[in-house]
Amino acid sequence: MVSWFFQHRCSVNGVVSYERNLQARQQCIKYHGVKYVVCDFDFLREYGTIRQDYIQVHHLIPIHENGKTYEVNPVTDIVPLCPNCHAMIHREKDTLTIEELKQHYANAQTSKRL
Ligand SMILES: [Zn+2]
Ligand SMILES: [Zn+2]
């Protein structure tokens, strides 16, 4: 498994910044598809066009030291999230897991239908 070195650019103190390593980002997107792991918001379907910078990647392994370089596997360590989900996952002081965010999302969808 090939891995890439890049700086962690996820959330520091609740501020979400963009992943700057395009290679790892693109590998992540290539593997996971232009599809978010939590919501099914589909930029292609909604807008007919997609700019890749609307896709944000989230690090599954929480890393807090700012500015350090890590070896990250773009398939298992980072996931594509839409900007909304990415903001939500970092809203709490402790970053939510993907499963927790999925649960929140599923609950919200259910109550919307009631
Ligand atoms: Zn993140
Ligand atoms: Zn989303």
Image (cartoon, grey):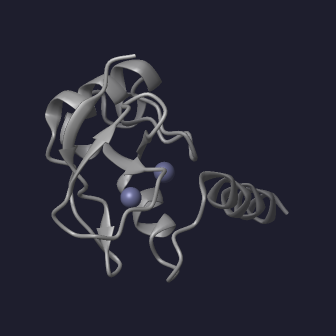
Q: Quadrant of residue 21?
A: top left
Instruction: Tell me which residue sits at (18%, 28%) in the image.
Output: 23
Q: Quadrant of the C terminus?
A: bottom right
Instruction: From the top left corner, tell me how far across and down residue 3 is, in percent.
Output: 30, 26
* Horizontal arrangement in the rendering, residue 88 relative to residue 112 (left or right): left
Q: Please determine whether, in this image, residue 107 is positioned above or below residue 19.
A: below
Instruction: From the top left corner, tell me how far across and down residue 90 is, in percent.
Output: 45, 70
Instruction: From the top left corner, tell me how far across and down residue 2 is, in percent.
Output: 32, 18
Judge by depth and name the residue closer to the eye, 69 or 41: 69
Instruction: Tell me which residue sits at (48%, 39%) in the image.
Output: 36
Write down which quadrant ligand 1 falls in. bottom left
* Horizontal arrangement in the rendering, residue 85 relative to residue 18 (left or right): right
* Horizontal arrangement in the rendering, residue 10 relative to residue 79 (left or right): left
Instruction: Tell me which residue sits at (73%, 58%) in the image.
Output: 103
Judge by depth and name the residue closer to the eye, 67 or 86: 67
Q: Quadrant of residue 111?
A: bottom right
Q: Quadrant of the N terminus?
A: top left
Q: Quadrant of residue 83?
A: bottom left
Judge by depth and name the residue closer to the eye, 5 or 76: 5
